[in-house]
Amino acid sequence: MASSSEHRTGYRAYTTKFDREVRASELNAVLGSLRHDQLVALNTAWEELQTELLPSKTRLHLIAADASSRIMAALTEADRRDTAISLLFDQSGSMRGQKMLFSAATADATQEFLITLGITCEVLGFTTARWRGGRSRSRWNWRFRPHNPGRLNDLLHIIYQDAADRRASSGSWDYRQMLRPDLPKENVDGEAIQWAARRLSQLPNKRKILIVLSDGAPVDYATLTANPPDYLGNHLREVVENIEAAGDIRIAAMGIGYRMHLFYPTSSYVEAPSELGVALINLIEQLLTA
């Protein structure tokens, strides 16, 4: 993963040596194999997604079909094929349970919705590999703890679907990995957005949209205890402002139980996780047809 450069806010990473970017199928290489109790929890969550969420998923597919008709009437096939949308999911600890469950269901349904329209789609996730700093913080401790060291945790960026994958459905198997009980930890939003934006910028599509789905402000214990308390939030604002100013990528956010307007000029909001899928389809339609 590329090293973060200095920013207007003075943001930097103390080290990027331990940051990882992996496909969902490769998570064992970072997190290790699941213990028996963790595997039981994953299977239980997966069963809930496949059965108890079925009525919600059916409703979402119907709403997506209606939205597809309106989008196809508003945009030519060439316009749709020249559009790429990246969905970036916060996978921090506060997203555990129903938020992550509905995020996985929403990711799968929205991927199918976009690919069927002929729109290029990426689905990404972000968290950290460890709690409370991991190996990055340990290295800082070994080196006499310089003041204001910058970001002090091991980033974990996950690819659930990349732009080259044109399958309308992957059978949800990759999204099963979202439900791993050992996955959610902390969230460094600014660098995750930079990563997703870099991936989008490398695509040939002329129109590019990045949507961040999150339930709160950036939080990383190790970073915030060794730097100013607004360190991560200020960097997130700076990253969003820079993307807006560049104009190559349209950025928006979907808040889950948290209003994102303090960080993003364009945002939407749901109170309950069960509302996420419908709200995201509506937001995408607005962004595409505005």
Image (cartoon, rainbow, N blue to C red):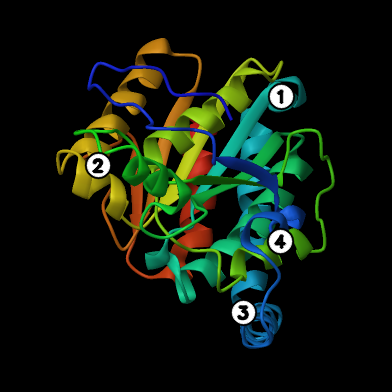
Query: Relative to the observer, which residue lies in front, 74 or 3?
Result: 3
Q: Amino acid at mark 1?
A: Thr
Residue 28, disc: 4
In the drawing, does residue 94 fall left or right of residue 24?
A: left
Marks 3 and 2, the one that precedes in the sequence: 3
Residue 53, disc: 3
Contact, CB < 8 Å: mark 4 with mark 1?
A: no
The reply to whether residue 262 is in sight is yes
Marks 1 and 2, the one that precedes in the sequence: 1
Residue 13 x, y percent position in the rendering: 38, 31
Front tag of 4 and 1: 4
Front tag of 1 and 3: 3
Residue 37 x, y percent position in the rendering: 63, 88
Relative to 105, residue 285 above or below: above
Q: Amino acid at mark 3?
A: Leu
**Alpha carbon of mark 1 to alpha carbon of mark 2: how far?**
31 Å
What residue does disc 2 label? 261
Occupied quadrant, residue 177: bottom right
Relative to 174, residue 100 above or below: below
Badge 4: residue crowd in 10 Å (few <14, some 14–19, many ≥20): few
Relative to 54, residue 61 above or below: above
Contact, CB < 8 Å: mark 1 with mark 3?
A: no
Q: Amino acid at mark 2?
A: His
